[in-house]
Amino acid sequence: MSATPRKDPVAVEAEVREKIHLEILKRTGAYHANDHVLLPSGQHTTEYIEKTLVTMEPSFTEGLGAVIAKHFAQWPVDVVLSTGPGALILSHCVARAHPSRPVVVYGTKGLSGGKRRVSLPTLNLLINLVEQLGAQVVGVGCLWRRTSVELSGRPVFSLVSRDFPTYDPDACPLCKKGVPLNEEFVRRRHARRPSSVQEPKAP
Ligand SMILES: [Zn+2]
């Protein structure tokens, strides 16, 4: 008689933790699933994370930052380097919770074609910059990681690791099924442009 094979307890723990993190992201309203979403790139997808909503609830942001800090707590850290101003609130929370009391610095990058995305090139750019200055990258902490993304062997800790397919509109199975397209996030991005800010009317 053979015993039922048990799952590796470390893997189970990681799975449970990830479920909790995903639940927190859902509660912030940032995570959307089972939808038909237009991405800023023009592609369509079923899942989407609206990063700006993650940091609207300070206690959630602090909690998520503390989880990342705890993961890297075993290493002395001088600097938490944020990929840009958008990630700065979470970076602050990571730095605040890390026992080394690191400082927070954020990188800026030129806008190309009006788009700015935190992508693999952005991270590699920052990693190279850090190493050129003679410092060592302890690791990369992030909210969400597409499992298909590799960072040339760098240790990456993400609160959630999930991949979801993106489709060109021509080849999108949801479009073929006639599912209405959710353009809310792209519209909201346009609404955030400073040009939409109106001067108060003179009395
Ligand atoms: Zn579609």
Image (cartoon, grey):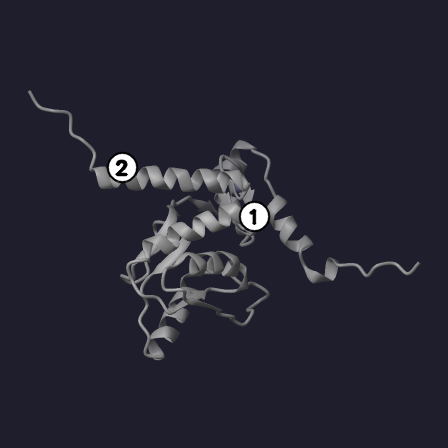
Contact check, label 1 and label 2, Cβ < 8 Å:
no
Q: Nearer the viewer, residue 159 or 195?
A: 159
Which secondary structure lies at badge 1? Answer: helix
Query: Few, some or many C-alpha atoms within 10 Å of disc 1 (few <14, some 14-19, many ≥20)?
Result: some
> What separation in Å lies between label 1 and label 2 (alpha carbons)?
28 Å
Q: Is residue 18 visible?
A: yes
Number of numbered discs: 2
Left or right: 123 with respect to 58?
left
Residue at point 46% right, 46% down? Answer: 166
- Residue 24 % position (x, y): 47, 40
- Residue 92 % position (x, y): 48, 60
Residue at point 22% right, 37% down? Answer: 9
Query: Mark 1 belongs to which amino acid?
Result: Leu
Where residue 74 is drawn, which disc sits there?
Answer: none
Query: Mark 2 belongs to which amino acid?
Result: Val
Q: Is residue 143 visible?
A: no
Which secondary structure lies at badge 2? Answer: helix
Quarter holding the C terminus is bottom right
Q: Earlier in the sequence, mark 1 or mark 2?
A: 2
Residue that label 1 marks: 53
Residue at point 65% right, 49% down? Answer: 187
For residue 131, above or below residue 14: below
Q: Nearer the viewer, residue 152 or 197?
A: 197
Residue that label 2 marks: 12
- Residue 3 % position (x, y): 11, 24
- Residue 13 % position (x, y): 28, 39
Query: Few, some or many C-alpha atoms within 10 Å of disc 2 (few <14, some 14-19, many ≥20)?
Result: few
